[in-house]
Image (cartoon, helix red, strand yellow):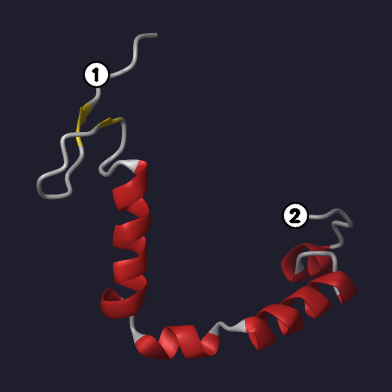
Amino acid sequence: MPRKPKHPCAYPGCPELTDRRYCEIHQKLTNKQYERYGRDPNTKKRYGRAWKRIRDSYASEHPFCERCYKEGKLMNC
């Protein structure tokens, strides 16, 4: 099936053609700007390295989905 034709990057003044909204360079830049200015700062505080370590250790100790485990399905979800 043919793909859609490429269109210019949505970043102001960028003539690069892309399949997405932004070209690769400006996608990284807009993500960085969003993380810095557009996202709630409390979210970043909540989900840091400590949270990731806790989540990973919990997932390794409890490999099954809690709902499936209660229903007796013993497979990873």
| Amino acid type shown at disc 1 | Pro
Left or right: where does residue 27 sit relative to residue 61?
left
Q: Position of residue 14 (x, y in %)?
A: 16, 42
Which of the two discs, 1 and 2, labels the residue nearer the N terminus?
1
| Residue for point 35% across, 9% down | 2
Q: How many residues crowd mark 1 within 10 Å: few (<14), some (14–19), many (20+)? A: few
Helix, strand or loop at mark 2: loop
Left or right: where does residue 5 sit relative to residue 52?
left
Quadrant of the rendering where the C terminus is positioned? bottom right
The residue at the far top in this view is 1
| Amino acid type shown at disc 2 | Cys
**Quadrant housing residue 73:** bottom right
Helix, strand or loop at mark 1: loop
| Of the two numbered discs 1 and 2 in the rendering, the one whose residue sits closer to the viewer | 1
Q: How many numbered markers are drawn?
A: 2
Dot 1 corresponds to which residue? 5
Left or right: where does residue 73 sit relative to residue 9?
right
Q: CA distance from mark 1 to mark 2?
A: 38 Å
Q: Position of residue 8 (x, y in %)?
A: 17, 33
Q: Position of residue 56 (x, y in %)?
A: 77, 74
Left or right: where does residue 55 sit relative to residue 25?
right
| Residue for point 29% across, 51% down | 26
Disc 1, disc 2: CB below 8 Å? no
Quadrant of the rendering where the N terminus is positioned? top left
Dot 2 corresponds to which residue? 77
Q: Position of residue 44 (x, y in %)?
A: 47, 84
Q: How many residues crowd mark 2 within 10 Å: few (<14), some (14–19), many (20+)? A: few
Looking at the image, residue 30 lies above or below residue 52: above
| Residue for point 76% across, 65% down | 65
**Along the line of sight, which residue is nearer the eye, 60 or 45?**
45
**Along the line of sight, which residue is nearer the eye, 28 or 45?**
28
